[in-house]
Image: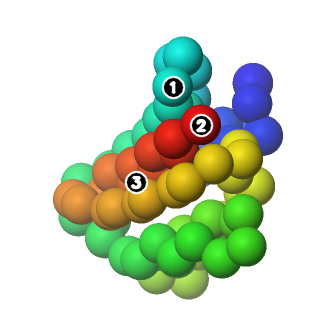
Amino acid sequence: MTAFQERFARREDAIARQYEYEDRVVLVADLGPGRNGSIDLLDGTAIVVVGDDEYEFDLPEGEARASMSNGVVTVEVKR
């Protein structure tokens, strides 16, 4: 289990995956329908806030962009 997946492991209904490609890393966490919140990227760290829950995880080196829609958090980091 990656550090990213461990951050979401405390939620029984969350599914988190990390995909490694030659030119990028994609991090995806499904927190469940209707679980909208926010995601911010700050100095190599992603911070996800959903209601009273907050998740922080380090990002791989590279140019990152993030989004959250319908309870799905996606972070793509170009190497």
- Amino acid type, residue under disc 3 in the picture: Val
User: Label 2 is placed on what type of residue?
Assistant: Arg
Assign the C terminus to one quadrant of the image. Answer: top right
Relative to 78, does residue 44 appear above or below in the rendering?
A: below
Q: Earlier in the sequence, mark 3 or mark 2?
A: 3
Query: Gap in Å between the C-alphas at discs 2 and 1?
Result: 5 Å
Amino acid type, callout 1: Asp
**Residue 27 point in image, percent of width and height:** 51, 39
For residue 23, the mark is 1
Quarter holding the N terminus is top right
Going from N to C along the chain, the mark reached first, 2 or 1, is 1
- Tell me what residue is drawn at x 66 percent, y 76 percent: 42
Residue 14 makes an appearance in the image: no
The vertical placement of 14 against 18, above or below, is below
Which of these two is toward me, 32 or 1? 1
- Neighbourhood count class around disc 3 (C-alpha, 10 Å): few under 14, some 14–19, many 20 upward: many
Q: Residue at x 51, y 25 (%)?
A: 23
Q: Which residue is mark 3?
A: 73
Residue bearing mark 2: 79
Circles 2 and 1, Cβ within 8 Å, touching? The answer is: yes
Query: Which is nearer the N-term, disc 3 or disc 1?
Result: 1
Q: Give the CA distance from mark 3 to mark 2.
A: 20 Å
